[in-house]
Amino acid sequence: MGSRTLGSPKADDRYCTKIYTSIHEIDAGAWDSILGENGLIRSHAYLAAVEAASIEDCKYFYPVITDLNGQIVAHACVYTIVTDFAQLLPNSLTWFSHLARRVWKRFLHVRITECASPLSASHSISIISGTERKSLIRKIGKAVNSIARAQHSSLLVVRDFLTADRNEFDSLLLDGYNLVSNMPLARIRVRWDSYEEYLSSMRSRYRKDVKRRLRTAEKSGQEVRILESFSEQSELWVEQARTVRENTKGFKREILPPGYYQHMDSKLGEKSLLVAAKRDGRIVAHGMVLHDDSDTIATYFGRNRGPASQEWFHLVNEVIRIGIDRKSNYINLGLGSYDAKSNVGADVEPLFVYSKSTITWVNWLMRLIPRTMDFSIKDPKRVFHDHHYD
């Protein structure tokens, strides 16, 4: 299926919106020309890698807005995916979903239309500078709505936005979207010239904890290696990621296929690497790391089956070292495990989602009970001696 034009030229003769069904239908140079900072996970190469990974039940769409001269002024990645909402039920009600699925196998399986950077906690919308950003954001929102209706998807989400982004993206509220909270983002603002300076800036209690955990890992014979080429062991990475997923409580992310690791390696090249924990001659855990001109981003972690040791901590410590050495602005540690991430200096920041239903009465109900999924964020820990928290 090729592209299709969305909307009537009479409604707005300044811009044209087209929806493509493969990133390969769009010129890579033209797409990447408007990314701006922090652009890796919105880049043509990243989206090509995710598209080629063949995530189960996932279909991709790319709204592209051009001006009268045919220049791209805004674009986004949108995808549909089937999500199991039963995993969000409290334990006291899981029996009900099991019982219901004896009659209806797809009970609480919902096809969602998401506008986001796939497999990451980041939005996917890029807009060229010097344009009417709020107007273009609303056009993207309308394109998402159009895709959802065409795909018979009743739930739309446009995610993930930091508090500073809301000034512009709250314009989606004018078109029937509702503001809700996602799980917060844990990230470290880098303000040190070296890993040693990072450690020395910690308050004594946190520095001792880091060193104690590292000693424990090293005494077990564990070491961390950086793998710049990692596609040949994709089956191992998938199995390790599955172990982490199975042990995750609450909402679970997509099941990764081998193609995810294969194409992150082949298509992103030096912008992707793996940190691997090795013990007794075997790789026992790993973490995927991406980096662009400004940020270091940890995406997926995995480990072997059995009791967890210090693998995760050892890997995260290496990600922090990499981010500092690369002079990143931020080290993005993703969602979840907030207490452990706070102990190594991460700030836990709210992330927001704009949601909507194509079913009128459901959208009405969503407006009646706003912000019911807000995540409470604890007061920040004073991990460092600086005045970052004042």
Image (cartoon, grey):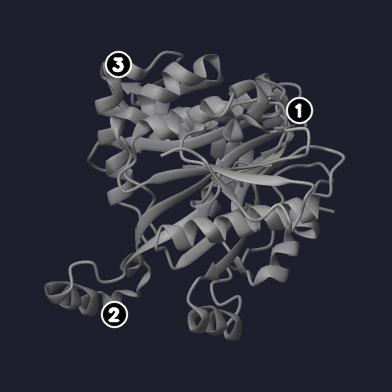
Please, what is the three-letter code of the amino acid marked with disc 2? Ser
Q: Residue at x 55, y 69 (%)?
A: 356
Query: Are the two marked residues, 2 and 3, in contact with CB atoms closer than 8 angstroms?
Result: no
Q: Name the element at disc 1.
A: loop
Q: Name the element at disc 3.
A: helix
Which residue was labeled with disc 3? 232
Residue 2 screen position, x and y as percent: 46, 37
Binning the other alpha carbons within 10 Å of mark 1 as few (below 14), some (14 to 19) or many (20 upward) gives some
Quarter of the rendering occupied by the N terminus:
top left
Foreground of the two, 243 or 293: 293
Q: Nearer the viewer, mark 3 or mark 1?
A: 3
Q: Name the element at disc 2.
A: helix
Q: Is residue 235 left or right of residue 250?
A: left
- Total label count? 3
- Separation (CA) of disc 2 from disc 3: 43 Å
Tell me the number on the disc at residue 92: 2
Tell me the number on the disc at residue 192: 1
Residue 321 screen position, x and y as percent: 60, 24
Foreground of the two, 110 or 323: 110
- Separation (CA) of disc 1 from disc 2: 47 Å
Q: Residue at x 59, y 30 (%)?
A: 43
Q: Is residue 191 left or right of residue 336?
A: right
Q: Residue at x 63, y 26 (%)?
A: 323
- Separation (CA) of disc 3 from disc 1: 35 Å
Q: Is residue 382 left or right of residue 80?
A: right
Q: Residue at x 71, y 21 (%)?
A: 194
